[in-house]
Amino acid sequence: MSSNSENSIASTQSVSRWGRGLPSKCHCGLDVVIYTSSSAKNPGRPYFRCPTRLDDHLFKWVEDGTYEVVVDSWPKLAGFDSELSAAKSEVSVELEALQAMVKELKEEVMRSERENQKWKLMIKLCCFCLAFIIIVIVFGILMFPKINEQRLFLGY
Ligand SMILES: [Zn+2]
């Protein structure tokens, strides 16, 4: 294809005739090839082209297709942005609920530990009292015969 025909096709057909976005096939069924322009007007500019290079077959500037992809993606990106914002607020609400739950659980653990310490102290006190009572009883049993002996010795 000469650079003149490339320019004339580009100006009239590139954007609208071949559909939006990046083409993959020509209407003839052949896979599209990317070439680089060597014309004086568009040196080094890449374009999609049907390998037949016939005038009524696909021609599209790569930058036009890329621009269309970006423009077509824009509403989707805006949708993603609002979805992301909604997800963020949902996550922050759930995070607050989880933080409140963690705080409640920590308080419950501290309450349980305090209760546990109180019971341990009570058990120690009971053990001490029980030991004291046992010592008093044993001491009483051991001393009781001596008291009786003293009564007999003194005669009353
Ligand atoms: Zn073709």
Image (tube, rainbow, N blue to C red):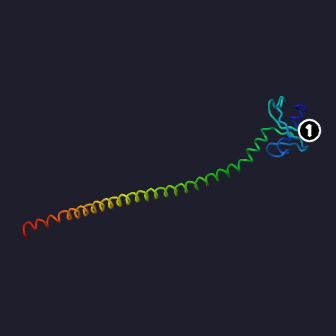
72 left or right of 114 in image: right
Quarter location, residue 107 = bottom left
130 left or right of 18 in image: left
Type of residue at label 1? Answer: Asp
Label 1, residues with CA under 10 Å away: few <14, some 14-19, many ≥20: few
Callout 1: SS? loop
Q: Position of residue 67 (x, y in %)?
A: 75, 42
Q: Residue furthest bottom?
A: 156
Q: Quadrant of ligand 1?
A: top right
The residue identified by callout 1 is: 55
126 left or right of 64 in image: left
Q: Is residue 72 above or below residue 150?
A: above
Number of residue marks: 1
Q: Position of residue 51 (x, y in %)?
A: 89, 36
Q: Quadrant of the C terminus?
A: bottom left
Quarter location, residue 56 = top right
In this view of the protein, which residue sits in the foreground, 78 or 89?
89
In this view of the protein, which residue sits in the foreground, 117 or 26?
117
Q: Position of residue 122 (x, y in %)?
A: 32, 61
Residue at (30% x, 60% y) in the render: 127
In this view of the protein, which residue sits in the foreground, 13 or 113?
113
Residue at (14% x, 67% y) in the render: 148
125 left or right of 95 in image: left
Q: Quadrant of the N terminus?
A: top right
